[in-house]
Amino acid sequence: MRGDEVVSFVAQLDPSTWSRSNMDGVNAWQMAPDFDAARSPLRGMRYVPDRPVADWNDFEKRLRRVFASLAVDVVRLTPHVQTVVWSLNRAGATGFLVQGWFASGQDHRLEIQHGDRGEHIRYIDYPHRPDCGEHIATDTLQALRDGGIAHPSELNYDGLVLPPAAEFGGLRLGLTRDHRH
């Protein structure tokens, strides 16, 4: 495996820590750990190409799968992953429509920007519970609809993983990744 490949994260640290969302054969999010780190007992890395999102139903299914996975797996995969930060943005625009993070050491968060210039940002924190990924996905989808997004093809996303020694490969949403955000 080359260091610049994007890989899906399938940790075989302890099979009892795997979430159901990562066992369906199509992983929800991707990262490449720091293979040089002394703390890296990771095996089972693989790459599965993503396909473009088709419509709102497809996007909703993917978003719910990704967020359900992140809400559970980020907490369980500490110290290899402590936080995954993400944003959904209108393609070609600066700034974000919605953004947030899934974190092992604090509540997960969703931030919803209202207005063209970010006049108001609503912050919602979610305590660690097995169903919080579902709640974050529902609130995110509603914010996108309220923000006037007619089709998910109007969206880009970006993200990063902390600790920064790990390389974030992406969220399997079927959207183009825009690194400007």
Image (cartoon, grey):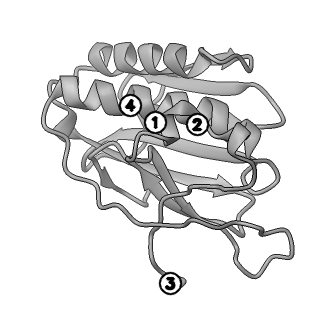
Q: Residues within 10 Å of mark 3 (few under 14, many from 20)?
A: few
118 over 131 or under it: above or below: below
**Residue placed under numbered mark 3 in the picture:** 1
- Visible in this render: residue 100? no
- Visible in this render: residue 175? yes
Asked whether the residues under the numbered discs 1 and 4 touch, taking CB atoms below 8 Å apart as contact, a structural biologist would say yes
Asked whether the residues under the numbered discs 4 and 2 touch, taking CB atoms below 8 Å apart as contact, a structural biologist would say no
Label 2 element class: helix
Q: Residues within 10 Å of mark 2 (few under 14, many from 20)?
A: many
Tell whether 71 sits left or right of 26.
right
Q: Which residue does the image show at 42% across and 31% down from the upper left?
A: 65
- In this rendered view, identify the residue nearer to me: 25 or 84: 25
Marks 1/4: CA–CA distance:
5 Å
Measured as percent of width and height from the top left, residue 161 is found at 63, 55
Marks 3/4: CA–CA distance:
28 Å
Label 4 element class: helix
Name the amino acid type tagged 1.
Val
Q: What numbered label is drawn on residue 66?
A: 1
Q: Earlier in the sequence, mark 3 or mark 4?
A: 3
Q: Quadrant of residue 80?
A: bottom right
**Residue placed under numbered mark 4 in the picture:** 63
Q: Which of pointers 3 and 1 indicates the residue nearer the eye?
A: 3
Name the amino acid type tagged 4.
Leu
Q: Earlier in the sequence, mark 2 or mark 3?
A: 3
Q: Residues within 10 Å of mark 4 (few under 14, many from 20)?
A: many
Label 1 element class: helix
Tell whether 3 sits left or right of 166.
left
Q: Earlier in the sequence, mark 4 or mark 2?
A: 4
Asked whether the residues under the numbered discs 1 and 2 touch, taking CB atoms below 8 Å apart as contact, a structural biologist would say yes
Marks 3/1: CA–CA distance:
25 Å
Marks 4/2: CA–CA distance:
10 Å
Name the amino acid type tagged 3.
Met
